[in-house]
Image (cartoon, rainbow, N blue to C red):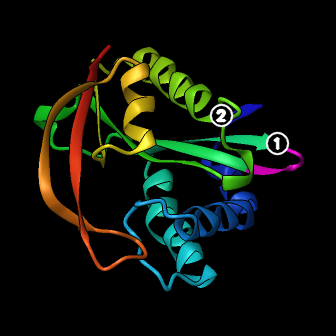
Amino acid sequence: MIEEIAPGSYDAEIDGLTSLLHACVHAGASVNFVLPFPPEEARAFWTGKVAVAMAAGKRRLWLARAAGQVAGCVMLDWDLPPNQAHRGEVTKLLVHPDFRRRHLGQDLIATLLAAAAAQGLRLVTLDTTTGSPAQGLYAAAGFNLAGSIPNFSRHPSEDRLESTSYMYRVL
């Protein structure tokens, strides 16, 4: 089940979101964090950066639930300059390692794309690790590769740099 979380009910989801992000980073997800990655750092991300953007009305959040817990999430961010008001960014598409291979990622991105179109956005962009399973998921959802940047980010658990691919989808 996928549901949008309203800013007023966001605080009730912090524990589940913290567990989700923590598990994904520890499973190797390259989503801006590196090991060691304690739960407190995951919680700080949700209670700080995300809570502020949601309260300001510049970010939307969808959760996938399975077996009574937060199994995945995705966010749409449109806190962009005035000349990019027609565009949104996909951020933090996460699926808990215990719930992968159940189409949650596809369902989450489809939900986000439908909401972005209904919101009047005409373009959705994102970045992802080049060659990752996520890049394939985005391509299957109709995203096109704009280009890649080598050595863009550090791998979450290994001492090496990874390329990042920028992708877009016209709505």
Q: Give the range drawn in magenta.
A: 66-70
Q: Residues within 10 Å of mark 2 (few under 14, many from 20)?
A: many
On screen, residue 70 above or below 106: below
Q: Main secondary structure of the magenta part?
A: strand
Residue 168 position, x and y percent, is 25, 28
- Mark on residue 104? 2
Quadrant containing the C terminus is top left
Residue at 65% x, 60% y: name it.
20
Q: CA separation, marks 1 and 2?
A: 10 Å
Q: Name the residue at the right extreme.
A: 68
Type of the residue with mark 2: Leu
Residue 71 position, x and y percent, is 72, 48
Residue 34 position, x and y percent, is 41, 76
Drawn side of residue 162 relative to residue 75, left or right: left
Dot 1 or dot 2, earlier in sequence:
1
Q: Where does label 1 land, which residue?
A: 66
Drawn side of residue 171 relative to residue 71, left or right: left
Quadrant containing the N terminus is top right
Q: How crowded is mark 1: few (under 14 residues within 10 Å), some or many (20 or more)?
A: some
Judge by depth and name the residue closer to the eye, 136 or 125. 136
Residue at 67% x, 43% y: name it.
100
Judge by depth and name the residue closer to the eye, 89 or 167. 167
- Name which quarter of the figure residue 66 lies in: top right
Circles 1, 2 touching at the beta carbon (< 8 Å): yes
Type of the residue with mark 1: Ala
Judge by depth and name the residue closer to the eye, 73 or 46. 73
